[in-house]
Image (spheres, grey):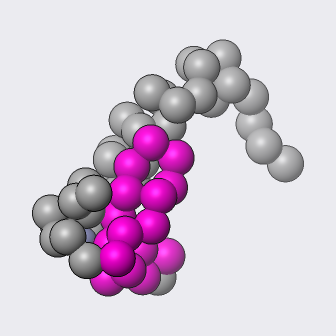
């Protein structure tokens, strides 16, 4: 499977409905909210999560 973020075909990690390579996973895990890429990742994950989890579940705060 190809990385859904950068398109690389390295060892990918399946995360929910997507796969991302180790590089992107590392970036994602370590990204700062101050990073201008943060919004890109946030939107990506939101879209993917909405495919994976019902909208109702997303509205429920996780504590
Ligand atoms: Zn990647």
- Magenta stretch contains residue 23: yes
Most distant residue in the right direction: 63
Q: How many marks?
A: 0
Give the residue displayed 47% in from the left and 58% down from the top.
Answer: 14
Across and down, in percent, residue 53 comes to 59, 28
Across and down, in percent, residue 38 comes to 34, 65
Viewer-side residue, 34 vs 30: 30
Q: Please say if 45 is above or below 6.
A: above
Q: Is residue 33 left or right of residue 7?
A: right
Q: Is residue 5 left or right of residue 13?
A: left
Across and down, in percent, residue 11 comes to 34, 76
Q: Is residue 28 left or right of residue 9?
A: right
Say which quarter of the image contains residue 13.
bottom left
Across and down, in percent, residue 25 comes to 41, 74
State the extent of the magenta-drawn residues as a range: 11-29
Is residue 34 shown to the viewer in this render?
Answer: no
Is residue 43 shown to the viewer in this render?
Answer: yes
The quarter of the rendering in which ligand 1 is drawn is bottom left
Say which quarter of the image contains residue 1.
bottom left
- Magenta stretch contains residue 22: yes
Give the residue displayed 45% in from the left and 27% down from the top.
Answer: 51
Q: Please say if 14 is above or below 24.
A: above
Give the residue displayed 20% in from the left and 70% down from the top.
Answer: 9
Q: Please say if 43 is above or below 61.
A: below
């Amino acid at each position: 499977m190809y990385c859904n973020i950068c398109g690389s075909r390295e060892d990918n990690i399946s995360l929910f409905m997507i796969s991302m390579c180790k590089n992107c996973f590392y970036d994602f895990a370590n990204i700062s909210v101050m990073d201008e890429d943060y919004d890109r990742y946030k939107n990506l994950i939101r879209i993917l999560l909405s495919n994976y989890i019902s909208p109702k579940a997303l509205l429920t705060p996780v504590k």
